Amino acid sequence: DVKVTQSSRYLVKRTGEKVFLECVQDMDHENMFWYRQDPGLGLRLIYFSYDVKMKEKGDIPEGYSVSREKKERFSLILESASTNQTSMYLCASSLRVGRGGNEQYFGPGTRLTVT
Amino acid sequence: SQQGEEDPQALSIQEGENATMNCSYKTSINNLQWYRQNSGRGLVHLILIRSNEREKHSGRLRVTLDTSKKSSSLLITASRAADTASYFCATVGYSTLTFGKGTMLLVSP
């Protein structure tokens, strides 16, 4: 079974702190994604990566950056956390299109609170 | 973006009843996927239907796709309390998905 793990289930940070959210997948997937989920807004794509050291902006990249130094690991970075970044953060991975489709496998989520 | 919109936003039924959720979208798609999310957890892929398919089954799930109306439906038959969750449709770009806001399904014993 595909396993996507996220470094924390719950995280509380202060405004202005630098925050790292880590995601690891164990199925050799090329694509990895970061979403945030907010009530009434659904899931919104922040960034995605289709290869090591490659990254693409999603729908809401402002205030975030990402890092993908190894194929299995995709990190989301909040350079200076703000209260409006309080949210549930979900990581996902998928095979490259042409290698079997684009069904996404999700981690359990990190609920981040910025105070 | 090709966002799907689910309808209804919330659905409450009794165990054993069928649950139907609908999804409408705006532009052409390669395929459409349905996901389930239990409270406070990650999403789980349920079923994928390609643009040239009209209907697909998986266990108690039946998905239909009408590309002329740009709509899809998810039917859960003989629902169980364990089916209580949020259900999302996702429309597919080349490698990214765009999710709707979901339908919250409550199945009461």
Image (cartoon, grey):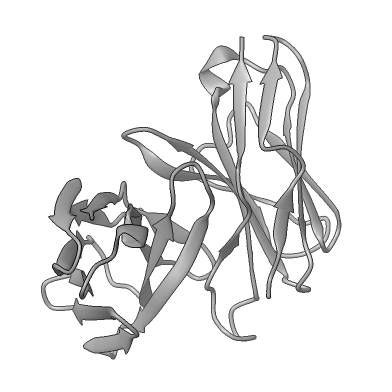
Q: How many marks?
A: 0
Q: Depth check: give the residue in front, A108 or B12.
A: B12
Image quarter (top left, top right, bottom left or bottom right) of the N terminus of chain A: bottom right
Q: Can residue B2 be seen in the rendering of this structure?
A: no
Left-right relation of A57 to B79: right
Where is residue A16, by image quadrant? Answer: top right
Residue A110 appears at what percent x and percent y?
Answer: 63, 37
Q: Residue at x 66, y 30 (%)?
A: A10
Q: Residue furthest right?
A: A69
Q: Can residue A63 be seen in the rendering of this structure?
A: yes
Image quarter (top left, top right, bottom left or bottom right) of the C terminus of chain A: top right
Q: Residue at x 16, y 66 (%)?
A: B20
Residue A84 appears at what percent x and percent y?
Answer: 52, 18
Q: In this view, does A89 lie above or below A49?
A: above
Q: Is residue A66 above or below residue A99?
A: above
Q: Is residue B62 above or below residue A59?
A: below
Q: Depth check: give the residue in front, A54 or A68.
A: A68
Residue B89 appears at what percent x and percent y?
Answer: 33, 62
Left-right relation of B93 to B80: right
Left-right relation of A45 to B28: right
Residue A91 appears at what percent x and percent y?
Answer: 63, 50
Left-right relation of B104 to A106: left
Where is residue A14, by image quadrant? Answer: top right
